[in-house]
Every structure is written in C-alpha cells, then in structure tokens.
Image (spheres, grey):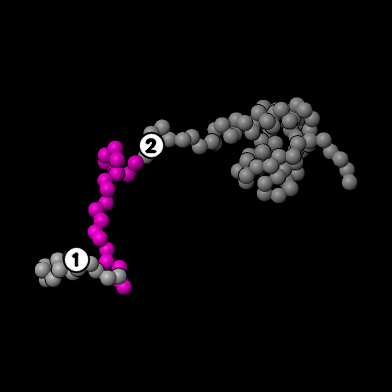
Amino acid sequence: PRESSGVLIRGDKSAIAYIRHVCSSAGSGAGSSELPATRELDETHIFCSGNQAIEKWLEDKIDAFVARNMLEPPEDTVTFNQGPQAPKAKSKAVQRQGQKRSAASAATDMDTS
C-alpha cells in the first residue's frame, strides 16, 4: 500500500462528472501541470491528488458548481385554484353497505321514489 496526499471527494454523479471534467480540462484556469491527477473510485467518490493549493482550487470549483446548479425555492406559493383558498368539496352522506338507515332517512327515500 502506498500513501498519497490529496482529497477524497464524495458527491452525486453530476458532481463527480464535473470534478472529472475540470481536472482533465486544460482551459480551467490552472496550468496543465498544476491540475490534480484523479482516480475515480465509484460513481459517488473520486480521489484527487495534490496539496493545499489544489484542495482550495477544487473547493472553489465545487462551490461555484453548486451555486450555479442549486434549486431555489419559488418566489410565490403555487396554488391550483383561482381564489386565495381552495373551494370546499360538497359531500353527500354516503350509505355504507351493511349499515342500517335511520327511520327518518328511510321515510325520506320512500317519499322521493
């Protein structure tokens, strides 16, 4: 086993893909000799070799990526009705099977039929 200095980064697939991209990109602002070597461990972990300067550079890149891609809460509350409150549904008394009807409701049903 060989020990290497660097940073172990854990993130979702898109964050790991972004780190892989910025570390392999020559136009990232750092010289190609200054870019960290990476080793992808799995879909959510990547190891970037380097020192404190590389760690700071990666941290800045990750912070910028998160700031650009973070979902923001909506400004207004979304409602699916026209008024300030949803209209209340009109409900009918449902006679459940197996329940006895009261004498008053039975008489009403006979009068309407």
Q: Residue at x 58, y 34 (%)?
A: 66
Res 38 seen here:
no
Rendering coords of residue 79 (x, y %): 34, 41
Q: Say which residue label 2 marks.
A: 77
Residue type at the position of mark 1: Ser
Which of the pair 96/40 is nearer the observer? 96
Most extreme residue toward the right is 1
Q: Residue at x 23, y 67 (%)?
A: 102
| In magenta segment, residue 88 | yes
**Residue 86 numbered mark, or none:** none
Contact flag, marks 2 and 1 (Cβ < 8 Å): no
| In magenta segment, residue 40 | no
Rendering coords of residue 78 (x, y %): 37, 39
Rendering coords of residue 29 (x, y %): 67, 27
Res 22 seen here:
yes
Q: Quadrant of the C terminus?
A: bottom left
* Above or below, 30 relative to 109: above
Q: Say which residue label 1 marks.
A: 105
Q: Residue at x 79, y 35 (%)?
A: 6
The span picked out in magenta is 79-98
In space, the residues marked 2 and 1 are separated at their CA atoms by 44 Å
What is the secondary structure assignment of the residue under circle 1? helix
* Above or below, 61 relative to 44: above
